[in-house]
Amino acid sequence: MRRSAAEIALSLGVLALGAGAAVLTASLPGEGGYARIGPNFIPAVVSAGLILLGAWLAWEAFSGGWRGAPPDSAAERGEHAFDRAAFGWVSAGLFAHMALVGNAGFVLAGAVLFAAVARGFGSRRPARDAAIGLLLSTAVFLFFVRVLNVNLPAGWLAPLLGGAGI
Amino acid sequence: MEALGALGAGFAVALAPINLFWGLLGVTLGTFVGVLPGVGPALTVAMLLPLTAKLDPTGALIMFAGIYYGAMFGGSTTSILLNTPGESASIATALEGNRMAKAGRAGPALATAAIGSFVAGTLATAALTLLAPSVVTIALRFGPAEYFALMVFAFVTVSAVLGRSTVRGLASLFIGLLLGLVGIDSQTGQARFAFGVPELLDGVDVVVLAVGLFAVGEALYVAAYQSRLPATLERLAGRVTMSREDWRRSWPAWLRATAIGFPFGTIPAGGSEIPTFLSYAAEKKLSKHPHEFGRGAIEGVAGPEAANNAAATGVLVPLLTLGIPTSATAAVLLGAFQNYGLQPGPLLFQTQTELVWAVIASLYVGNAILLVLNLPLIRIWVRVLEIPRPQLYAAILVFATLGAWSLHQSPVDLAMLYVFGLLGFAMRRWDFPVGPAVIGLILGPLAETQFRRALAISQGDASVFFAQPIAAALLALTALLALAPWVLRRLRRR
């Protein structure tokens, strides 16, 4: 019988999400005025729903696997095995962007993100990718700030970008 | 006839030069982004939402009408030439369209898709124009109990009835409902599930969820499992036109598909996926050339594409008249309305008559722009498909993070974006439908408000949901739909 560790873990994850929500719901007030139900009523319903769905998923996982779920073997799905480096590069790009955008600015953070994601997808020319990323995010920056009036952080490049943005 | 007068006034607004410009910009950007492989219409609309932050509501919504249609059309171009549909609604198009492209008939395939989209979109918009006022008249009599019942009905049909797995659809819906609870409770001011984080007090923005699930999740998934697979792009040789024979075979398919697509769009049946496949099946059955199906039959492109556009227009009927989104894209559009403090529904037709009809008029205009723009520009869209995957996904993520950052200028939104990206990755890998989560996020709080309002009116008496015939009938129908598959399976096993 097919039994997938990932499916079991995810089922328990949904269950835990519902349980966590239930714990938080318990501290919400139940005063309801005319309706006689307070701000805790729907959260309680949703928590209970998640717990039930987690249990249902777990039951499916233990009794033959999730119904109609894709096969665990990547080859059977017509894909290659999980590429940890690729996943890591895309994630690292997003984290670097998160850390940089506030102080280094939108343009530099965008260039770093661009180069890291391209690396994750198999590009081996980081300097060229960074340059493309720099051009793209500069163009986007100028379009948003000058044409659409949307504020974006200029950061370290503020002198070059003409003090536009914030 | 009242509607025609209002529509006339709407055209006056939609055809004003500045609004025409926003419509044109919307169609162009929508098609450009929609063409990108892996980018469906919901993501296109969500990624382009920040563009309109400083526009007036009329201009912004007209632009969104253009983006909506552009994104739909862009997806079909991708599925014909690349065979990687960016959205489930384009899968049926890819079946025959990609075969036609492989046989060197990409031109006629793209032409029948473009002209069929225009024909179906225009007919469906006319149907919307005629239907909307009567739905509004009925909806004005709805109280909170009826609205709540209608929303529960929509929840169940989009998550539990359609799709491969009831339990995974419901799990997706409930995750969306949970996220919808985050923030200040609109009735009492009580903060819920916010952990004292100011960004969370505002609630989870639909843009962050949609972009996280669709863009970041998709990028993580493709990087992890598909980045080393080769992609084959079909060449577009010859002109994008149709022969007399192509026309003769496309016409009936377009009309039939409109008749299938529009009604399906108006009911909460999860958008365009089902009608496109129904249209494909109908064309296959009725075709005088059934042997061509599977080898590139033009009816197999004309039908599903027209059905897709007709359904996409049909989806706007419940969205505009009732405020109920029945597809992920419609949920993001509803978020766009809410950004301007507008709540779609029957009251909007009364308080903002001009705005609503300007949006409807811009649907006609958007369809026409799409046709005029796309036939000549199609070679440019084909070039977009030639962008190598590394740079393509890098660019998508630059735009994805821009949308999340522009909400509060805060890294918290970017962190949420990544968390939703991980969620989207898992949902893609283990086949959870994403639409119900987005619909749950945006419709959940509205349903809660109606639920509590209904109970406040009845002084806490829950029988209010069963005492009124419309609400009771809708809830009974919901229960029937939810249980029917299970009961049928039981009966069949005997």
Image (spheres, helix red, strand yellow):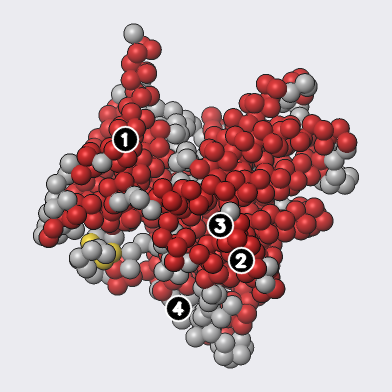
Label 2 Cα crowd, 10 Å radius (few <14 / some 14-19 / many 20+): some
Q: Quadrant of the N terminus of chain B?
A: bottom right
Amino acid type, callout 3: Glu
In space, the residues marked 1 and 4 are separated at their CA atoms by 53 Å
In space, the residues marked 1 and 3 are separated at their CA atoms by 31 Å
Chain under callout 1: B
In space, the residues marked 2 and 3 are separated at their CA atoms by 11 Å
Above/below status of B1 relative to B304: below
Q: Nearer the viewer, residue A149 or B477?
A: B477
Chain under callout 2: B
Q: Quadrant of the C terminus of chain B?
A: top left
Label 1 Cα crowd, 10 Å radius (few <14 / some 14-19 / many 20+): some
Q: Residue B385, can we see it?
A: yes
Are marks 4 and 2 in one subunit? no
Is B211 on the left-hand or right-hand side of B101?
Answer: left
Tag 2 residue:
B9
